[in-house]
Amino acid sequence: MFSMNKSSFIPIDTPILFLMICLLLTIGLGLICIKKFKGYRKNIFKFWCLSWLIITIILFSIGGFGRFVEVNTINTKGYTVKELTEDLEQLEKCIIKENPLYFADKAELKQLFSSAYGEIKDGMTELEFYRLVNPITVAVRCGHTNLSISEALVKNRVKTAAFFPLKVTFVDDQLYMVEGDLERGINAGDRILSINGRTDDEIISMLIKNVSGDSRNNQKAKYIISKHFNNKFYDFVDNSDSFTVEIANNKGEIRKVNLNSKYRDEFNETAWSLHFTEIQDGNYYESIIRDEFAILSIRFFFEEEGTKFEEYLSEFFISLKEKNISKLIIDVRGNYGGPPITKTLLSYLVSEKIEYFEGNLPLLHNIVGYAKPVYPANIRFDGDVVVLIDGAVFSTTAHFCALVKHHNLGTLIGSETGGTYVCTDSSKDKVLNNTRLRFHYSTLTYKVAVDGMSEDEGIKPHISISPSIEDILNGRDVQMEKALQFLKLSN
């Protein structure tokens, strides 16, 4: 397969950007030639096309567009010290020179890079190199800064990878089986004490060190581990063919079982792609209006195809007004963010103008309206509001929750968010030249206009409640139940 480079200017593949520039300049030349150079048009276009052909060949030959990768053997391909050092230098340049490093300890980063250079060995595979350098990207302490395996390795894993076979979750700082295996006497809800000699505490520690999050807040990392344990365990802890697992049942009885690894497509994901696994259907927002209350669920702050967010909210809040609904639950659990279209939602909750972002923003951001304050909508909701939150909530969604809490626009129920009132984004993508690892990293800092909140913690709920393993297995939504109870409603 051909692994394409990513543009440093806009989030598209370099060959596509090159083609766009070529076409635009060609159209421009054509318009000029219509008015001038009538007798030389053919010669000019011959020279023009030949020049672009030569430029294309040169860029292709030096790897400017990307390079061909052998998918079938990429998992075992070894790289030289020189190749791996070049990739680490490329990663270091992106982090040190382009990332805001708002939450990072620069001395710690310097030490981590120095150590990684010394640990590079000849013949390391992509996965071995990934395990070596990924903790550096996590040390940036930015939830938008993620290092992912190559596109080729993702495709290769369909035929070569085998994961821990039963789905596992992370609850109350412990690991639990979500699925059982009756043949081996494993039940959903059994606690995992160790896997292949590593204790659950050791495993959890290794995973948290390899999942990106904002500042020193590890709520987002814990959430991702709870949803994507099997993928993270394979990448950073153990990709063995078999596992000896020490488990304890709900009676406290401890025993060991043996499991063979197995490929499951749902576990074959990457550090960045897993943020979008729950919204692949394109259904980002939905609502329910009942006799006494309404629920607005927003899985991702992004425009749905064919249903604009602004129009959807307008129709929704008009319906609430017409039906005299005075109690509203806004559910943003599992919502990692998106662009700040949250301002539209806030406009239905505020009674007066509020500032959204703090400080100066780049010119382009001002042009598209990022710097504008939030004004009350014509039809605003003045009833009781509850916002359901969890560890996935960061970036734009955490900004929304920070403003809701700061301006007393509603009651937050659930668990501490993964983000706070400040984050770094305006992200770029880079493909490392040799291993083709994919680096997604932030370049700008965004703060919402609030006071008295910590940069090192997530947004704390007014009412803290999280599901137990029993709640998860029984499909019981204790946070929604608490919201209904708080609003003095019945299901």
Image (cartoon, rainbow, N blue to C red):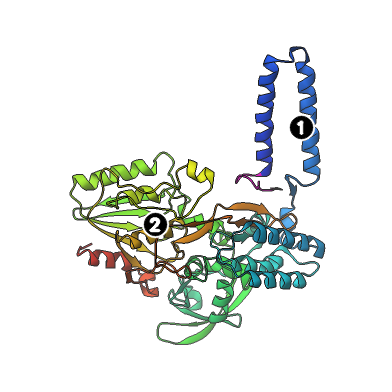
Q: Amino acid at mark 1?
A: Trp
Identify the image quadrant of the C terminus: bottom left
Residue 12 shown in magenta: yes
Asked if residue 306 is positioned above or below residue 340 in the image, the reply reads above
The percent position of residue 215, horizontal first and vertical second, equals 52, 68
Residue 319 sits in quarter: top left
Query: Which segment is the magenta one?
Result: 1-13
Q: Nearer the viewer, mark 1 or mark 2?
A: 2
Q: Which residue is located at x 79 percent, y 30 percent? A: 51
Looking at this view, is 249 or 441 the one in front? 441
Q: Which residue is located at x 63 percent, y 45 percent? A: 9
Rendered image: mark on residue 400: 2
Q: Amino acid at mark 2?
A: Phe
Of the numbered discs 1 and 2, the one sitting upstream in the chain is: 1
* Residue 476 visible to the viewer: no
Can you name the residue that lies furthest to the front here? 360
- Mark 2 neighbour class, 10 Å CA radius: few under 14, some 14 to 19, many 20 or more: many
Apparent side of residue 106 relative to residue 333 in the rendered image (left or right): right
